[in-house]
Amino acid sequence: MNRPLAGRVATSVQDNPRAAAFFAGALDEFAEIRAAGRTAAHHYAIAGLVLRIDIACGAMEHSLCRALQHLAIPSVERPDLSLVAWDSASTGSAPLRAAWSIEDYGNYGLIGGFNDVRYYAAAQSDPAVIFGMLDRQAGQALYWTPDAGGLPIWERGAPFRPLLHEWLYHCGLLPVHGGAIGLEGSGVFLAGAGGRGKSNVALGCLAAGLSYVSDDFCVLSDSPQWRAHSLYSTGKLGSGDLVRHPGLVPLVSNPHALAHEKALFFLHEAFAGQFAHHLRLKAIVLPQVVGEGRSDIVPASAAEAQRAVAMSTVRMSGWHGVSTFSQVARFVRALPCFTLRIGADFENIPALIGDLLSRLAALPH
């Protein structure tokens, strides 16, 4: 799939002078912060592409780079995307001034007049103000928030996600909502809406020694075969699920906030040897909590799998709905699909996943 998707044709800067002028002005503001020596540069390898992030030192860097640290690489002269990120509180810079009116905000936070085949721009305001903009043609992006100290848990666990989603999608990859775990370079994709058990299964398998790509969000490619690529090193669990994962309790990064938010783990720091940058996918597995009896794995229909993968992914990026359904349909048609019925014996699930991978490896190609 490593090719530009249909319809993603870049245009010249004159096509959208308002967006071009705003983007250039924002980059100039960041350049002043960088010139003052208040930024750090990081490089990351994501699904065969290189991301450079220039980011304000201090709270901003600590909050947003930790989840990407497992993908860190030495500096590269010509990255595929250069992203600058800053907040006003730590840098003392003026707030980024909008060049649009409140009437320009649309669905998903997209900003009217600033979204076309070249530019993507979106903002959110609850619970924190975050603005992101991408110039697909130039391979540049910017990210601003008033105060990095106010960023919510999901932003710390999956930083820059809409911007990275747009960039990866434009590069011919498929960012999806789902996890991936495996053994010896091969794995299964865990699909389903939130609350279906993906994180519990993925984190239980990680604790049992399996390889780990993600419990919640990863990137798919299809050349030369379907693979799941790691993006974030984090995992999340509802506080009520921690009883199933006693080994993870010391790794909770937000222990004082569990009454109102999920537990967030930076897993690479404790399980570096089990992190896989990618896994060759052999099957799609749909967790389903049964709650009693023995856990088992049974065949599932492609239609079930397509709904599970596509619907949860579209909720994150509804503006790509039609294309996402099309790409997910190809993915589902390429792999066998199963339902993992989670019974009372949760501790047996890693062995079930291992047995499934062994059976699939024995099948003729």
Image (spheres, rainbow, N blue to C red):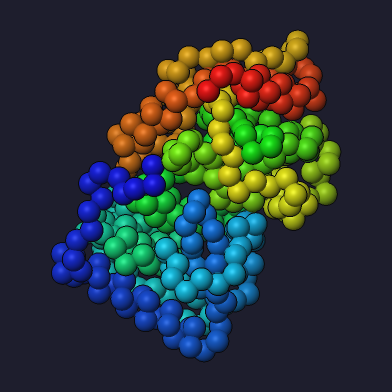
Q: Is residue 48 left or right of residue 346?
A: left
The answer, for residue 158, to whether it is visible in the render is: yes
Farthest residue in the left direction? 15
Up the image or down, 240 lies above or below 105; here it is above
**Residue at 64% from the left image edge and 67% from the top image edge:** 62
Spot occupied by residue 150 in the image (x, y as percentages of width and height): 57, 62
Residue situated in front as seen by the camera: 229 or 179: 229
Residue 177 location (% of width, % of height): 50, 38
Q: Please state the total of marks drawn on the protein image.
A: 0
**At which x and y percent is residue 73?**
60, 65
Closer to the camera, 5 or 111? 5
Instruction: Please identify the quarter of the rendering in which residue 186 is found.
Output: top right
Q: Is residue 116 above or below residue 196?
A: below
Q: Is residue 165 left or right of residue 18?
A: right
Quadrant where the N terminus sits is top left
Residue that extends furthest to the front in the rendered view of this protein: 364
User: What residue is rendered at 44% in x and 25% in y?
Assistant: 334
323 displayed left or right of 339: left
Q: Residue at x 31, y 37 (%)?
A: 323
Observer-nearest of 17 and 258: 17
Can you give x and y, in whole percent of width and height, for residue 47 in the image?
50, 51
Look at the image and tell me whether residue 112 can be seen.
no
- View extreme (top): residue: 293
| Residue at the image point whose x is 48% and y is 88% from the top | 35
Where is 94 relative to 310, above or below? below
Q: Is residue 274 left or right of residue 178?
A: right
